[in-house]
Image (cartoon, helix red, strand yellow):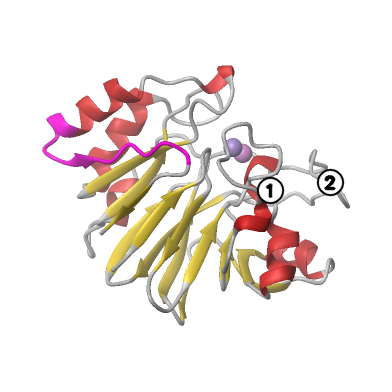
Amino acid sequence: MLRLTYYGHAAIQLSDQKHTLLIDPFLTGNPVAPIKPGEIKACDFILVTHGHADHLGDTVSLAKRHKSTVVATWELANYLEAQGVKVHPMSVGGSYAFPFGRLKMTIAFHGCGGPAEAEGPAVPANTPVGFLFQFAKKVIYHAGDTALYSDMKLLGEKTPINIACLPIGDNYTMGVEDAARANEFLNAERCIPMHYNTWDLIKADVTAFAYKIEKQGKKCTVLKPGEYVEL
Ligand code: NI
Ligand code: MN
């Protein structure tokens, strides 16, 4: 069984009997995070979509404490490795068979030039990405921060997507309209909205979003920070 826990913003934890993955673990400084980084009990892999502080978050301290492998773009991986973190560098378009399943880095239309506002050494310029991967017999897509783009149609074409985590907060990423359109392109069975209501600037009407998804005949699972779903 797969348990997907939402920690607010773009932070998502996935676990099954064997592995625990954290994606974009922004807990410290996240006004909606329901837990502190010290409350994360295990994580063997951390996936980081890009170097903005609201995604990189607590990656360094968590990876050190749990001896996790951090999956990130080459530029970001080098930066993390220099801080004593175990890394697996990749680039957009590439895939690799990890112990939990195969993972591909996907396109994300967003910016990420250094120096960033994160603590510690300045983050180098890095390409923002999304992740499309297998975990616990499901196909999961975490879009990262991105605009809508029509090539999302390709992502679910060969292997249907079971769960798509999509930003809906607008301003920095897709808003409600575009994220609903993205889900049409992805043709994902279930959609989980993220990257909204963390701050006023990215306030979104999640009920309107869920309605749009259900009108497509798809499921929308709205999780409050700290809630989880078992699939
Ligand atoms: Ni960003
Ligand atoms: Mn962001």
Q: Determine whether, in the image, residue 143 is placed left or right of residue 178.
A: right
Q: Amino acid at mark 1?
A: Gly
Residue 231 position, x and y percent, is: 25, 59
Q: Nearer the viewer, residue 21 or 88?
A: 21
Q: CA distance from mark 2 to mark 1?
A: 9 Å
The residue depicted at 68 percent of the width and 75 percent of the height is 67
Q: Which residue is mark 1?
A: 57
- Residue 94 shows up from this direction: no
Q: Which residue is mark 2?
A: 119
Residue 180 lies in quadrant: top left
Residue 224 falls within the magenta-colored stretch: yes
Q: Nearer the viewer, residue 119 or 175?
A: 119
Mark closer to the chain start, 2 or 1 = 1
Residue 231 falls within the magenta-colored stretch: no
Q: Nearer the viewer, residue 49 or 125?
A: 49
Above/below status of 156 relative to 186: below
The residue depicted at 57 percent of the width and 68 percent of the height is 43
Q: Nearer the viewer, residue 32 or 21?
A: 32
Q: Which residues are magenta?
A: 214-225
Q: Amino acid at mark 2?
A: Glu
- Residue 103 shows up from this direction: yes
The residue depicted at 42 percent of the width and 77 percent of the height is 100
- Mark number displayed over residue 113: none
Magenta-drawn stretch, dominant element (helix, strand or loop): loop
